[in-house]
Image: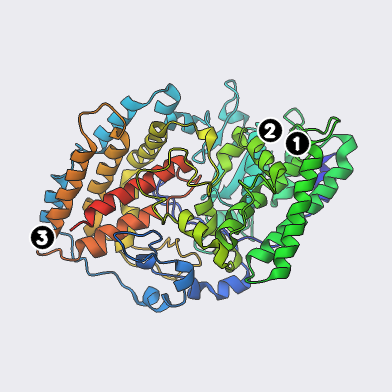
Amino acid sequence: MNGSIIRKSLLGTIIPFVIITSSNCFVTQQTHTSSSSSSSAKKAAAAIAAPRSRLSMANDGGRKSTNPFSSMLGDLASSVLKGGNSVGPKNDNLDAKLLSKSPADGWDKIRLEWEQSCTTDEERNFRSLVEQGRIASPLNQIRLFDSSQTPDDIRVTFYRDSASWCPYCQKVWFALEEKQIPYRVEKINMSCYGDKPRDFLTRIQPNGQIPVAVIDGRLYGQSNDILAALEQEFPNHTSLQPSAENVSRARSLLQLEQALAGAWLGWLRSKGNKGAKRNFEQTIAAVEQALSDNDNSNNNNKGPFFMGPRVTIVDVQFLSFLERACASLLYFKGYQIRGNQKTFPAINRWFDALEERPSYQLTKSDYYTHAWDLPPQLGGCGEEPEGEPYRRKINGEDASWHLPLDKDGDDDDVEPEWKFCGSSEEEHKREAVERLSYNHQAIVAFAARGAGSNGMPPVLAPLADPNAISNEAVMVGVDVVLQIVALALLRSSSSSTTTDEELETSLANVRDEINDSSSSSSYMTEGLLPSLRYLRDRIGVPRDMRYPAARQLRAHLNWAMDILQQK
């Protein structure tokens, strides 16, 4: 199956996606992302924007959780008119008192304690390995696979979304990793809430769409064309082509993938549509059957993947939409695919086999991330009552984002276990601390948007606001609390003499200092707590960290907020 056949058989996708994400505070100082949108979505932009102060998705101190998807229209006026809050001006005296309450001696000391707690050189040298491209990470700007390779060996420049969420980018990203082709990464804003670089629009892609790849100076502007070119231009790398005798089956399966995408989106975007549900169930049953036939085969096709024992272009095409279908249909419809071994054993074996591959481990997202980035992409998703218990768990309600966390890490079988990340909670916590401590200044400023002013013009995604203005008055308080959170992550299972009780006392002292300040009556309720929630609700997977680390950080932020809200 040569490159031209691949181009012909990769038929394209059903509808364009609009990927929206918040700014990437864990990675860079000023990174924002977005994608192209349909004209109908653009017309709805103003109606979908929501003020960040309303976007609390988990219960805090007994207050009712707010689902931004149900309050978008009602929040429009306050989103447009809001010009800040009543926290007041920066209070240097209060800031000094808050700094004195931190048990940490600054972020440098936290970083040193993190480094001393690392158990491998790879973990300790993470940033330098990322910079050199020697370790796989969403943070990579270059990627090398062999110790003999240098940046001069790179022939591919890969333009993708900064959020690591775009389904088409994921396909190309997975293929580059699977084939181990060295590449350079350029991250591009998505047009639905950020301007694209003028140079990208004039030189690379006038329509602004991503992904784009430049290979040996030649530009490829669609994911299918990129995948075909990678096969054609890199014949000495691992091939994703099916064997010659399976070309016809591969074409049929690619048509099934298109049918699945259409059936999934048709049901997801509707509400109470029994016909759309029936169409999806028939289509996903055909996918299950295709994998089951393959897995039970007695010939060379036997294996967990669509074409047998090895990954091919067919798996590449299925993985991004099927991953998103598992997350979104559970969240919005209460329809379980992943974890439903009785109905979908072959699909679950396929996912299990994918998760053994570093190329998929790198690009995989969590259910929460998908559940929140898909509605603005699609112009909305239809919520069904059957999905409510799953929405509560995925959104961090029902104590699923509170300590102590389930030891197995699967939140009662809602989010599939990320076994490939290992079972060490300490390692997951260190990953979260690494991200916090390395870029703490940008993270503090990002979180302070929760107490700041909405950006203008408003944007499609309720959790994205690249033009928002941070409130400097709360930054020291946010910084101090994040230092305590980082210490709690590091010390909760260590031999340190500092106990959880002492860290709780430090948070209580912060709370009391704020409450005793006569000039800062709204600092807690309208400043510090909204900022911490803002950060918690915008931790993205895999963009910021892997799911087990994100889970720990979300829960420890809630631990801090619970103490801060005590009377």
Residue 184: image location, x then y, percent:
58, 38
- Relative placement, left or right, of 85 versus 24 is left
Sequence order check: which comes first, mark 2 or mark 1? 2
- Where is mark 2, residue-wise? 179
Which amino acid is tagged 1?
Answer: Leu
Sequence order check: which comes first, mark 3 or mark 2? 2
Which amino acid is tagged 2?
Answer: Lys
- Relative placement, left or right, of 327 versus 28 is right
- The kind of secondary structure element at disc 2 is helix
Sequence order check: which comes first, mark 3 or mark 1? 1
Residue 390: image location, x then y, percent:
52, 57
- Relative placement, left or right, of 370 versus 514 is right
Residue 228: image location, x then y, percent:
76, 43
Q: Which mark is residue 517?
A: 3
Cα–Cα span, label 2 and label 1: 8 Å
Check if mark 2's residue and mark 1's residue have beta carbons within 8 Å.
yes
Q: In this view, does 52 lie above or below 125?
A: below
- Where is mark 1, residue-wise? 240
Q: In which quarter of the image is the C terminus?
A: bottom left
